[in-house]
Structures are given as structure tokens and as C-alpha cells.
Image (cartoon, rainbow, N blue to C red):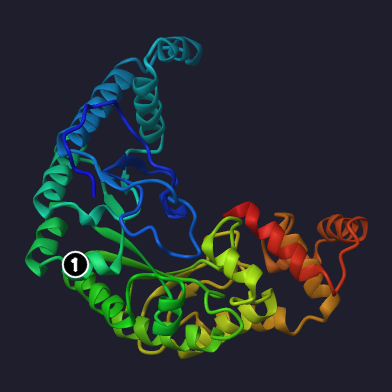
Amino acid sequence: MNTSKEYYSGFEIGPIRPPSEAQSLLLRITRNCPWNKCRFCRLYKNESFSVRPTEHVLRDISTLKRFIDELEQAEKISLSEKRIVMQRLSEQDYLACQSAEMWRMNGKKSVFLQDANSMIIKSDDMVTILNALRENFPDIERITTYARSHTIARIKDEDLKRIADAGLNRIHIGMESACDKILDLVEKGVDKATHITAGKKVKQAGIELSEYFMPGLGGNEYWRENAIDTADALNQINPDFIRIRTLAVPNNSLLSEDYKKGTFTRVNDERAVEELLLFVNELKGIDSTIKSDHILNLIPEFEGKLPEDKQKMIEALEWFLNLDQSERNIFKIGRRTGIMNSIRHLDIDSKRTRVIELINSNSINNDNIDTVVEELMKNFI
């Protein structure tokens, strides 16, 4: 982990955020991922992890504050004049000004701390950054970050509570699976027990918790274990949100090499839906909200509040499984091309016609549809 003294090179933004943070200010605390070994992920491969100096993050906050104040004072300036002013800025200042303006337009209510595991920094430094955000932007309602279970489990309870009191009120943890066999195979660097410990610690600190589940990660060999063991862990944690992220195997990932060698076999859409059905049936005694907020998920309607919406979610999955093969094919291609974004869209003639034309023009049939879907899903990783 590189924390050596470095020159401040200006405002930074990392590569990703959760879909739920689309309107958030992105503030980079760390660069890349300290683990960076997961076989299904290629995002940070060949990139070294480093912690940005706290004083650099504080300078970012001061820069954002300055630009927001100037933008609010210049409210009456025309958009064209504003663009001319922005074009005169340095590259780093332009990025900061652009971020400030977008966040201002979105109401300045939420902040996302990047990159993959910013909870790895010293607790005192995190508290300092959170205090600076609250002092400069008192209207902030939510501050969120990604974290690894392994990291959270090692933070003292009193430190996690201090961080919560300073304003961090949501943590996203990529559980992906709680099956130890799968976690070992994909080199997740954590086990089920640690997932459970970390999740409970976040909840105990009073921080809102989002846990991610990845249907398909166990392949055809361990899809049942993936569903059952992950549901069991989540039943013990009772996170605020369970977010579904169906596996897609990106090119150049280690998992894609396993796939080519035949040591990993990808589940098709039907099996992934069966896995979700088993998963949701195993969820018991919790009041989490399930979110299907990513295009990689086949059934957008598979979401709701437990336990009251459980039957509705089961019915959405069964709807797909009860379709005949040709109808399933139309919906799969429609969903993976973005033409259909709801199960209701299967009944819209204009959308059906477009999808059927695609199927016919590309000679998609029962024998090759799974391969076609695999390739389409890679576009959304």
C-alpha cells in the first residue's frame, strides 16, 4: 500500500460508483483496490493501490466549496458564458468545477467516497474528511462508500461508531457470495464468517448497509450453494439493502480464463432465475429491501421490501420460467439489448417486433442464444 509523500496533482475522480449514487458528488479517498485478486473482476487489474493523503482530499473539498460558491454567485450568467469561463480552467480545475456544478444541480445531498475500499484508511483520517464535508456542505444528507468485509471486520467497534457519528451513513459491501467454496474459487479473500461479522458491525454502528449478491458466481456446479449459503448469511445480518448483480464474465478476467479451460461453467439466464428463486425462498426473518438496479439483472421486477413483497418477487421470477422457450428468447434478447426494461414490455407489439427482427437477422436460435446473451452482457460490465 503506497502512502508515501506525494505532490498534489489536483482534483481526482475514480472509475466507478454504485448506480444508486448517480446524483452524488464523487470524492476520491483511495485509488484502485487493495485486494485486486477477485477472478471475476478486471476493473483495477495492473493498477496499484494507494491512499490519497488526507490533506489532498481536504484540498479537493476546499476546491469544490470555492467553485460551488462562485457558481451560486454567478447564477445569472448565461450557460454559454459559463462554458467560456470553464474552458479557461486547468484540466484539474475543470474537472472539479464540472463536478461542483453537477452536484449543485442535483441538490448537494449525497457524497460517495471512492474507490473500492476507502474504509481501509485510518479511522482518524476518515473522521477528519467527514467532518470537513459536513462543515463545508451542511446540507449533505448521505455519505456513502464501498468496503470489503475483511476490512470492516478489523475496525474497532468504537472507531466504526466514531465514523458513523461523523457522518458516514451508508456502506456498500460486495458480498457476492457467502459460500466458502465459491469464495475460495474466485479468490474473494474473505469467508462467510467474516462477511457475517462485518455486516453485523456495520449495523451495530448505526450505518445503513447494502450487501451485494451475485447470482451465477458459483457456476453450474455450485448455484444451489451460492443461493442457500448467501441467504443464510444475509438472514443473520439483516442488511438494509440486498442488491442483485448477476454475473457477467468480462474478457481478460481470470474467470474468463477458467471459463475457456472448462474449470468454470457459466449459468444461463434460466438457471440464474432458478438460483434467484431459491435464494429469495431461503430469505427468512429479515426486513431488507431487495434492489435489482442494474441492467445485468434479467428481471427488473425482482425487487421489493421483505417480507411483504416476497410473493410478488417470486411471481416475477416464475413468470419468466413459465414462458415457453420462444417467448423466453424474445425477452432475453429484448432485455440484453435494452429494448425491454420490464416484463410488461413483452406484450408491447412495437418492442416485440424490433426484438424478433434482431433475432431473425442475426440467426439467433435455441442452440446459440446463451452465447449471444453472454456477449451482450459484456457490454454492460
Horizontally, residue 165 falls left or right of residue 86, namely left
Classify residue 288 by image quadrant.
bottom left
Q: Is residue 183 shown left or right of residue 363?
A: left
Frontmost residue, 74 versus 35 = 35
* Badge 1 amino acid: Gly
Quarter of the image where the C terminus is located: bottom right
* Corner quadrant of residue 187: bottom left
Left or right: where 36 falls relative to 168:
right
Q: Quadrant of residue 96?
A: top left
Residue 157 spot, x, y in % from top left: 11, 69
In percent of width and height, residue 266 lies at 63, 74
| Viewer-side residue, 60 vs 283 | 60
Q: Residue drawn 7% across and 66% down?
A: 158
The image position of residue 92, as x and y in percent, is 35, 23
Q: Is residue 89 above or below residue 174?
A: above
Whether residue 343 is visible, yes or no, is yes
Report the residue at 81% width, 57% height from top. Answer: 351
Whether residue 307 appears in this view of the structure is no
At horizontal 75% and vertical 66% (from top left) the residue drawn is 371
Please report the residue visible at 28 percent of the width from the left and 79 percent of the height from the top: 196
Secondary element type, mark 1: loop
Give the camera-side residue of 345 and 10.
10
Front position in the image: 141 or 340: 340
Q: Which residue is mark 1?
A: 206
Left or right relative to 41: residue 237: left
